[in-house]
Image (cartoon, grey):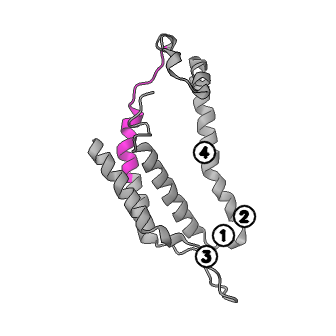
Amino acid sequence: MKIYVTMVIVLSLAVSWCFADQVQPQTPPAADSSFHPYKVNRWVSGGIVSAGAGFRLLSGADILHKPNIDSSSELATLNTNVYTSRFDQWALKQDPSKRVGFEKVSDNMALSIYMLPAFLLLDGGVRRDWVDLLMMYLETQTITFSVYNLSPLGPNFQNK
């Protein structure tokens, strides 16, 4: 499984590096109303998004089936002196019985953050390029998810 994850990371980085110049902004010609500032290859971007969706389905099961820490006794016996950062110390002092409420707040905040780019559609100049912008957004989200979740920094490798 670890070799598979390493291959996915290397492949994602290689593909994103090879096609990094596809989204470079271009300067508009003087009176060209058909100018589009983004050069997006929809086949390449669609392939990256599709591959990322497949990897997300494969890796999502591993993340969802990790054991929950529901028992207060397990948290009470945890040696908090090992964690030196103030954030970790603060996080360990939270009430575990309020986990469901914390999850709802987290989910609502994440959903609102994901939806913020939709406000770009209020601008008429951006609205005409919505397909290219959507492809770039999905491609960015896919690469970000893959690099985080499938790397040693993500939840597939960490058991905190």
Q: Amino acid at mark 2?
A: Leu
Residue at x-position 69% and y-position 73%: 125
Q: Kindly identify which numbered label has been placed on residue 127.
A: 1
C-alpha separation, residue under disc 4 versus residue under disc 2: 19 Å
Real-space CA distance between mark 1 and mark 2, rounded to the nearest whole angstrom: 7 Å
Label of residue 122 in the image: 2
Instruction: Tell me which corner region of the image, top left, top right, bottom left or bottom right, holds residue 96.
Output: top right
Q: Which residue is mark 4?
A: 111
Question: Residue at image x 63%, y 84%?
Answer: 34
For the image, the number of numbered tags is 4
Q: Upstream in the sequence, badge 2 or badge 3?
A: 3
Q: Residues within 10 Å of mark 4 (few under 14, many from 20)?
A: few
Instruction: Check if residue 56 falls in the magenta segment.
Output: yes
Q: Amino acid at mark 4?
A: Leu
Q: Earlier in the sequence, mark 4 or mark 2?
A: 4
Tell me the mark number nearer the camera, choosing from 1 and 3. Answer: 3
Magenta region, residue range: 54-71
Find out whether the residues at labels 2 and 3 contact each other: C-beta distance under 8 Å: no
How crowded is the residue under tag 2: few (<14 C-alpha within 10 Å), some, or many (20+)? few
- Tell me if mark 3 has few (under 14), some (14-19) or many (20+) residues whose alpha carbon lies within 10 angstroms of its own: some
In space, the residues marked 1 and 3 are separated at their CA atoms by: 12 Å
Report helix, strand or loop for mark 2: helix
Q: Would you say the residues marked 1 and 2 are in contact, meaning their CB atoms lie under 8 Å apart?
A: yes
Residue most extreme to the bottom: 31
Q: Earlier in the sequence, mark 1 or mark 2?
A: 2
Amino acid type for the residue under numbered disc 3:
Pro
Q: Nearer the viewer, mark 2 or mark 3?
A: 3
